[in-house]
Amino acid sequence: MNLVYKPLLMDTRHMIAYERMRMEAFGFEPSFCEEYAKKMFPMMARQGTKSFVAVGLFVDDTLDAVAYVSNSHDSFYIEQLFVRKSKQNKHLHLGRILLQFILDDKESFEAYFEQVFSVSSLTPIDEKSIKIYTSLGYQPVSKQFGIYRKSL
């Protein structure tokens, strides 16, 4: 299994593909992804070119995991992290691997966002992701908002 981690293109066409993968990964109907991406991503781009970054994990030349990373919540924030539906629960641990690549690449994100990060934050969506994130050192800091944090 050949793994390659790299930044992803963030034009509307590619973002539609990532959003379709995200909707399918979380078990939602992906049909509205195109309309959502056409409205949402140009607006985000107007807010500032550095609002977030998309990175991906390619397995044997196929994009199988994606994360959106920002500097929200005064931290190195993992906005979204998702794995292609067909690659989930296969004991490949692609989400965990992608998250570790991201954390190991912190300096690149610090340069991009022009900010030094002392913590990373994320918001798990289910019990399985909570187990994964706590095993990587994330701890709950806000029960109201479900935010987990890790010192870097």
Image (cartoon, grey):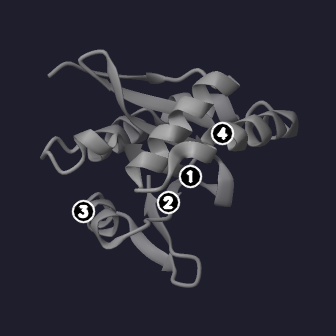
Q: Is residue 51 visible?
A: no
N-terminal of the pair, mark 4 or mark 3, is 4
- Pinpoint residue 55: horizontal percent, then vertical percent: 49, 31
- Marking on residue 115: none
User: Alpha-carbon distance for marks 4 and 3?
Assistant: 25 Å
What is the secondary structure assignment of the residue under circle 3? helix
Question: Label 4: which residue?
Answer: 52
What is the secondary structure assignment of the residue under circle 1? strand
Circles 2 and 1 in contact, beta carbons < 8 Å: yes
Q: Residue at x 71, y 40 (%)?
A: 35
- Indicate whether 102 appears above or below 72: above
Circles 2 and 4 in contact, beta carbons < 8 Å: no
What is the secondary structure assignment of the residue under circle 2? strand
Question: Label 2: which residue?
Answer: 122
- Pinpoint residue 57: horizontal percent, then vertical percent: 36, 29
Question: Label 3: which residue?
Answer: 135
